[in-house]
Image: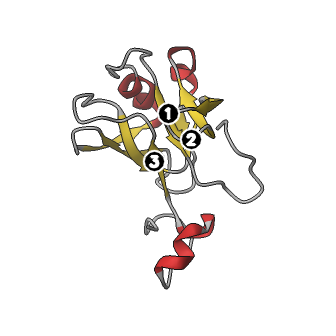
Amino acid sequence: MVCPSDITRRAATNFQSLFRNEQVSYFLGTDALPELVNTFLGGDRDIRGGTSATCGLAGNIQITAFQPPTWSSMAWSKTNHVGSGNILEGDGRVEQVSSKALGQLASRTLDNGQDNHALKPLSFGESAGGG
């Protein structure tokens, strides 16, 4: 569950250790469905932007919401893929997109709220929610 480009994460040596943030490089989309082909099913964890929210579908946990007002502020960190990243979409397609194109990709979401929600592993020193 560790991306080779993620220099701050170490690969898990067993399944038990996957429960720790340090062994996960990807976020999980909490509202992706097969019929919503453009929702975020997953992607690189270093996605920035969005707002802190609570997701009832994911057991009322803190998530990051990427709603229309936040699309222009979405970006990738400059550490893992140097200003670009990978998004796994609801239909199983993976797109590598630049920071510049990330908000445009999010705007193609087809769900009722026109948003994407992500459960992100925390970076060291980061609090839950937000980007």
Q: Quadrant of the N terminus?
A: bottom left
Q: Secondary structure at mark 1?
A: strand
Query: Residue 96: horizontal and vertical position, in percent?
Result: 33, 44
Q: Is residue 68 left or right of residue 94?
A: right
Q: Is residue 49 above or below residue 2?
A: above
Q: Residues within 10 Å of mark 2 (few under 14, many from 20)?
A: few
Q: Quadrant of residue 17?
A: bottom right
- Can the viewer see residue 11 in this picture? no
**Residue beneath the point at 65% across and 54% down:** 122
**Residue beneath the point at 57% across and 46% down:** 77
Q: Name the residue that disc number 2 marks.
A: 59
Name the kind of residue labelled 2 in the image: Gly
Name the kind of residue labelled 1 in the image: His
2 vs 3, front mark: 2
Name the kind of residue labelled 3 in the image: Leu
Q: Is residue 1 left or right of residue 110?
A: right
Q: Residues within 10 Å of mark 1 (few under 14, many from 20)?
A: many
Q: Secondary structure at mark 2?
A: loop
Q: CA distance from mark 1 to mark 2?
A: 13 Å
Q: Quadrant of residue 53?
A: top right
Q: Name the residue that disc number 1 marks.
A: 117
Label located before the other in sequence (2 or 3): 3
Query: Residue 124: horizontal and vertical position, in percent?
Result: 72, 60
Q: Is residue 34 above or below residue 9?
A: above
Q: Name the residue that disc number 3 marks.
A: 28
Q: Is residue 110 above or below residue 126?
A: above
Q: Secondary structure at mark 3?
A: strand
**Residue beneath the point at 29% across and 29% down:** 38
